[in-house]
Amino acid sequence: MAASRDKSNSGTTQSPPSAPKEGFLAALAKGKLAAKGKLAAKGKLAAPTKEELAAMIISGKTVNISSKDVGWKNIKVSDTTKALNEPHRKRAWIVMKPVNSNTHWVSVVGNVTGKFPPKHESTAAFVRETVLGGLARDAFNVIRDAAEITTDQLSAVTGIPSRTLQRRETFKPDESERLLRVASAFQKAVEVLEDIDAARRWFSAPKKALGGLTPLKYCDTDVGAREVEALLGRIDHGVFS
């Protein structure tokens, strides 16, 4: 019986392994999702994870994605998202739906780090480990740019001097906690006002309920940040103060 032919020497051209598909958030951040309800990179992106199936706030507009969809073919992007490809918007700011304590903190850490908790890990453990592991240097810039505030403003409210910013690759846990404190308050503003530009204006405008200080400035302490979120909670329930 003739020996079987070695397929590796048969002259058949083997196709190279396919490149890994790009993640949903990375593509969105790079402006690869077109406006007017179409997905420019359809078929070339990895299907979004359950954590990524969310309502997203982008340049003041909302992208609604059903949590029941698990592949690109059923995902429809709202045609109100004309700002998706604006070059000055470096990344989307995400709001997980429905909004609750868990989805709030998943959104906060996801927005700041681009990471989401493993499937079976609790949200509290995920946030705690993020703080203890320290935020990357870029987290400062992400929060600053999202809220459209200055480096000096965020430096003052978090107590992280500019000289520290220049040498940090990874923030210490206490510094990371202060940065997430500001990010959480800003996240709450986006969730309540449902418009990132409105949230930016609200965050930087003096409030009588805060003694004439801005919500941003009030976030210089933990108790102050909690009061900012409590104020937003009252606004969410129709109590304007």
Image (cartoon, rainbow, N blue to C red):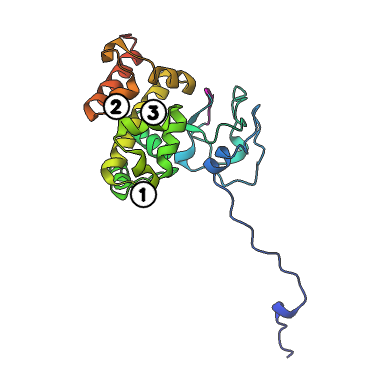
x and y percent of residue 186 in the render?
38, 27
Point 27% across, 26% down: residue: 225
- What distance separates the C-alpha of mark 2 from that of mark 1? 22 Å
Query: Depth check: 3 or 17 in front?
Result: 17
Tell me residue 184's x, y (percent): 34, 31
Q: Is residue 63 magenta?
A: yes
Q: Nearer the viewer, residue 71 or 239?
A: 239
Can the viewer see residue 134 in this picture? Answer: yes
For mark 1, what is the residue? 170
Query: Of label 1 and label 3, which has the lower sequence position?
Result: 1
| Callout 1 amino acid | Thr
In the drawing, what numbered circle is on residue 219?
2
* Span shown in magenta: 60-65
Label 2 environment density (alpha carbons within 10 Å; few <14, some 14–19, many ≥20) = many
Asked if the residue under mark 3 is in contact with the one under mark 1, i.e. CB atoms within 8 Å, the reply is no
Which amino acid, mark 3?
Answer: Gln
> Which quadrant of the view contains residue 72?
top right
Q: Nearer the viewer, mark 1 or mark 3?
A: 1
Residue type marked 2: Cys
Q: Which residue is mark 3?
A: 187
What's the mark number on residue 89?
none
Q: CA distance from mark 2 to mark 3?
A: 13 Å
Secondary structure, mark 3, is helix
> Farthest residue in the bottom direction?
1
